[in-house]
Image: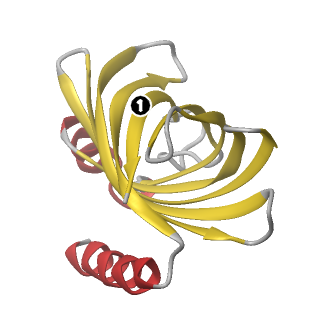
Amino acid sequence: MKKVLLSAFAMFVMVAVGAQDFGLMAGYTNNTIVDGDSGSGFNVGAFAEFDVSEKFSVQPELVYTSSSIEDNSYNLFNVNVMAKYNVVDKLDVLAGPQIGFASGDIPDTLDDAFGDDFSSLNLQLAVGLAYDITENIFAQARYGFMLNDHLDVDGGEAQVNSFSVGVGYKF
């Protein structure tokens, strides 16, 4: 896991060097398990932005999310790639994959109980909106739908969807 995160960080730094914009973001996250339990926490991350055309850009991100569900921790280390389409001046629609690796109390408990039938991979499809408040400051909101399952057992399901809102700063 440490090698994967270190490799992702190194790749992100190399990508960010060639970006038109790069920056930091932080915000509030609510994670919901399919059975209805949910918990809130925070997210922090870094991003780079590459313009493809006047209205379309690609935004790779590295994001850490920490939340608590019924006093149990659920953390994600995400590598996201969001496509951004500028609908009107200052307003963008976001969509893309969020690839996370889960850690914390909940994933550790599932791993102990299910062993090889547990996966820490959290693959989501996220959709959302971003609004440029100033040239450098933006606000965004997005919802991530988990596409896979943490468990590979009959009758067992452990999916975590996420909603996040936050602000960011472009350098």
80 shown above or below 73: below
From the top left corner, tell me how far across and down residue 61 is, in percent.
46, 60
Label 1 residue SS: strand
From the top left corner, tell me how far across and down residue 45 is, in percent.
33, 52
Tell which of 82 and 66 is nearer to you.
Answer: 82
Position of residue 163 in the picture relative to residue 91 (left or right): left
Q: Mark 1 Cα within 10 Å, few/some/many (few <14, many 20+)? A: some
The quadrant in which the N terminus is found is: bottom left
> Splitting the image into 4 quarters, where does residue 74 fall?
top left
Q: How is the image coloured?
A: secondary structure
Tell which of 166 and 96 is nearer to you.
Answer: 166
Callout count: 1
21 shown above or below 7: above
> Mark 1 — residue?
166
Res. 64 visible in picture: no
Question: Residue at left 42%, top 77%?
Answer: 16
Question: Residue at left 77%, top 60%?
Answer: 56
Res. 61 visible in picture: yes
> Splitting the image into 4 quarters, where does residue 126 fall?
top right
Position of residue 66 in the picture relative to residue 21 (left or right): left
Query: Amino acid type of disc 1?
Result: Gly
Question: Residue at left 54%, top 72%?
Answer: 20
Question: Residue at left 31%, top 83%?
Answer: 10
From the top left corner, tell me how far across and down residue 29 is, in percent.
38, 27
